[in-house]
Amino acid sequence: MVQSGTKQAFPLKALVLIAVIVGTTALAFAFTAGWLSPHRLTPEKLVAALQTPGGPPLGHRRNHAKGICFTGDFEANGRGTELSTAQVFVRGQYPVIGRFNIAGTDPHASYADAPVRGLGLRIATPDGQEWRSAMIDAPIFAAPTPHAFYRFLIASGSKDPNAMREYVGAHPEILAFIDWVKGHPRTESWSEDRFNSLNTFVFSDASGAKHAVRWSFVPAAPAISLTPEELANRAPNFLEEDISHRVAAEPQRWDLVITVANPGDPTADPTKAWPEGRRTVNVGTLTVRQIEPEANGPCRDINYDPTVLPTGITTSDDPFPAARSAAYAVSYDSRTAESAQYPRTTAGADQ
Amino acid sequence: MITSRTRFAPPQRLLHWLMAVCILAMLFIGVGMVSTVHTKYLTLVSIHKPLGITILLLALIRLPLRFYYGAPALPADLPEPMKLAARLSHYIFYALMIAMPLLGWAMLSAAAYPVVLSGGVHLPSIAPVSPELHSLLWDAHRYLAFAFFALILVHLGAALFHRWIRRDGVFEAMAPVLQNSHGRSAGNSK
């Protein structure tokens, strides 16, 4: 095909052809990597948009940077097996490594200022599988898509007073979230908070039927709200002190309640709550038995990636778990590279 | 390891082209998946892991075949630096084909992620959980992937250089099928 009859000629055409083939391959690689697509929303950009002006919290999670570890167990009552084949729903007790936290990028923030509280969980089952989840106490999420969430973060961090106004104009659903952040009564303890998956996942049962679900960890302890004055007077670390005292006195419990979507419920948009009256199944109880500071704690090196799911649970058409997985990996890769910046308090004591 | 045969043995050629497809796909999937927050991120990751293990297994089959069959001698008139580059690149390719999947597997282990292949198949952890180790392995996996792709570009350019400019039979030694007169005889007639 290439000038087979012109052996002695200067092989310019062949050289050019080789350069074109090699160059095209390199270009395809660069395109795939996003180097030619400056507008592609990369996980790095999403994580960078979280940052406060003081720079990233070196060695810490890039968001929900402040928190405390716990261990305990999840005791399944067996009722979840009608929804999912995951072993975690078979009657039995499975070990948990978790983390109570607050939203925000400052690992030294005051708990009184937290806009949102969170719960990270890793439940391990004897079949070698894991279910990881990262939930918050908000009833709905801030943005309908990862791209919108990115624009919201950029607008929030912008010095231009019009940036937020423009975002709200394009995404009025943010107002419900902002109203909740500003207005919801803060409880005196993580153990009084309800934590919600917000994202929709799919459970597959033994017959192969699929169920779109969201879930919540519902506290056993009754919620006691703090007034804004009481909240302002709490010590900066009051949530850690509270949970340490409570768990030392007795284990703290939450019920895991699965909510099953009706046909037509919005599964892809976590800003949209499902209507009341959906079927719920209480599938078991989380018991928190021991609190440990994060610096040496067992949750420190766990990425609560919500796409680490056992067989029987998968992601849905909700685009957030994939985006969160990609972004959490960037956060994890960054903070593990900076682990010297977040020293373990008593080296090796817990290892 | 050098034999008098002019072409690689059929199983070697088969593995070369099969792995060429796998490895190119792997590198594109790898660099593509870390560039996006789109839901295809999860799809790409779910291909990346079993494909990596597939490449590792194929490499572990291919290495003994290389010892058994050897490689055709390079043309006698090939300049020494090019011969050295050819031999060196083969060592590096084998090292990368085996090391990259192991680095990825160890990196997930060091980060305490479960290593799940398709169909719920779990691989055991092959490294202790350690942020420092994870960081080291992650960097190695990432930078060696770029080095791997760069080496493939050089390899591709060199193969085509042998095919169209030197016409010395080196390309034909690994070609899946021989075409007309571009084979060894063309190179020998020089």
Image (cartoon, helix red, strand yellow):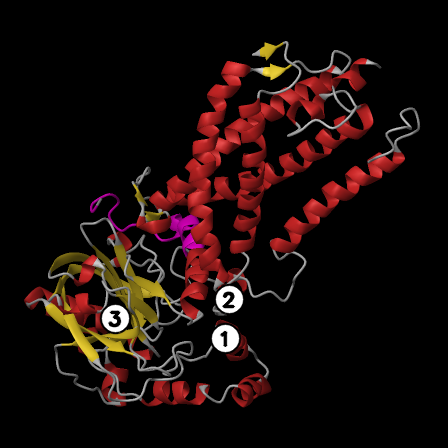
Subunit of mark 1? A
- Which residue was labeled with disc 1? A153
**Dot 2 and dot 3 within a common chain:** yes
- Which numbered marker is on residue A46? 2
Instruction: Residue under label 3, please give it.
Output: A237
Q: Position of residue B72 (x, y in %)?
A: 64, 15
Q: Between tags 3 and 1, which lies in front?
A: 1
Instruction: State the CA–CA distance, disc 2 to disc 3.
Output: 28 Å
Q: Is residue A228 visible?
A: yes
> Three-letter amino acid code at disc 3?
Asn
Image quarter (top left, top right, bottom left or bottom right) of the C terminus of chain A: top left
Left or right side of A263 for B14? right
Residue occupying image coordinates x 50% and y 61% = B40
Look at the numbered disc 1 and give the secondary structure of its residue: helix
Kindly identify which chain the residue marked by label 3 belongs to. Answer: A
Find out whether residue B146 is within the magenta segment.
no
User: Are the residues at dot 2 and dot 1 in contact (C-beta closer than 8 Å)?
Assistant: yes
